Image: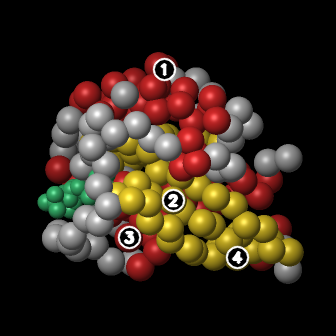
Amino acid sequence: MAVITKKICMLGDFGVGKTSLIRRFVEQSFSDQYLSTVGVKLSRKSLEFSDLDQEAKLLIWDIEGQTKFKAIAASYLQGAAGVVIVGDVTRSETIQHFQDHLNLFYSANPKGKAMLVLNKTDLIEPAVSQKLEAFLEEAIANVSGIYQTSAKTGTNVDTMFERLAKELIIAP
Ligand code: G3D
Ligand code: MG
């Protein structure tokens, strides 16, 4: 089985659930409380796609201790094959910032793949998050997928990361 290593970055406003999504995906766990550390954290997870005879080794980069005014270092995005852009469905401004995050990612990686993630869907009615997804489909072009997730319940978390990994394997 061929092995391919890909860097994935998490982008999104503070508190939207980036770290929680990684924890859910990598450790299959969710903690309502944990301590943030400062800097960048790397997580690893391997996924096997037997139908493609490929193993994807994902290196997931996460900014810890992020603040509103701290600029994202160029090295954070450099060489990333994919990005997961996360918003909090209970804070619309975090979703309004999606295009800015996407532009930042594409300026560093024009051929990268992007996923848009509406997180914390456990906190709102399904009809509301459905509307948000429909809005994003109209408003934002050039993404590989839009997902409604909950890092708390685990809904769609694995599906989203697996879809992105598959895109990265298939991508030229
Ligand atoms: P960040 O890494 O994007 O800054 P975190 O965000 O992963 O640190 O999450 C911020 C807060 O949102 C955390 O709560 C976390 O538990 C909560 N959270 C993350 N994802 C979800 C979700 O899907 N549903 C719900 N209900 N909460 C979520 P605290 O209280 O620790 O600040
Ligand atoms: Mg975090």
Q: Is residue 24 above or below residue 143?
A: below
C-beta proximity under 8 Å, tags 1 and 3: no
What distance separates the C-alpha of mark 4 from that of mark 1?
33 Å
Q: Residue at label 1? A: 138
What distance separates the C-alpha of mark 3 from that of mark 4?
18 Å
Mark 2 or 4, closer to the camera: 2
Q: Is residue 143 above or below residue 171?
A: above
Q: Earlier in the sequence, mark 3 or mark 4?
A: 3
Mark 4: secondary structure:
strand
Residue type at mark 3?
A: Arg
Q: Residue at label 2? A: 61
What distance separates the C-alpha of mark 2 from that of mark 4?
20 Å
Mark 1: secondary structure:
helix
Residue type at mark 1?
A: Glu
Q: Residue at x 45, y 26 (%)?
A: 100
What distance separates the C-alpha of mark 1 from that of mark 3?
29 Å
Q: Earlier in the sequence, mark 1 or mark 3?
A: 3
Q: Residues within 10 Å of mark 1 (few under 14, many from 20)?
A: few
Q: Earlier in the sequence, mark 1 or mark 2?
A: 2
Q: Which label sits on residue 73?
A: none
Q: Is residue 155 visible?
A: no
Q: Residue at x 45, y 41 (%)?
A: 72
The residue sitting at the top extreme is 139
What distance separates the C-alpha of mark 2 from that of mark 3?
15 Å
Mark 1 or 2, closer to the camera: 2
Mark 1 or 3, closer to the camera: 3
Q: Residue at label 3? A: 24
Residue type at mark 4?
A: Glu
Q: Residue at x 53, y 31 (%)?
A: 104
Q: Position of residue 9 (x, y in %)?
A: 53, 52
Residue type at mark 2?
A: Trp
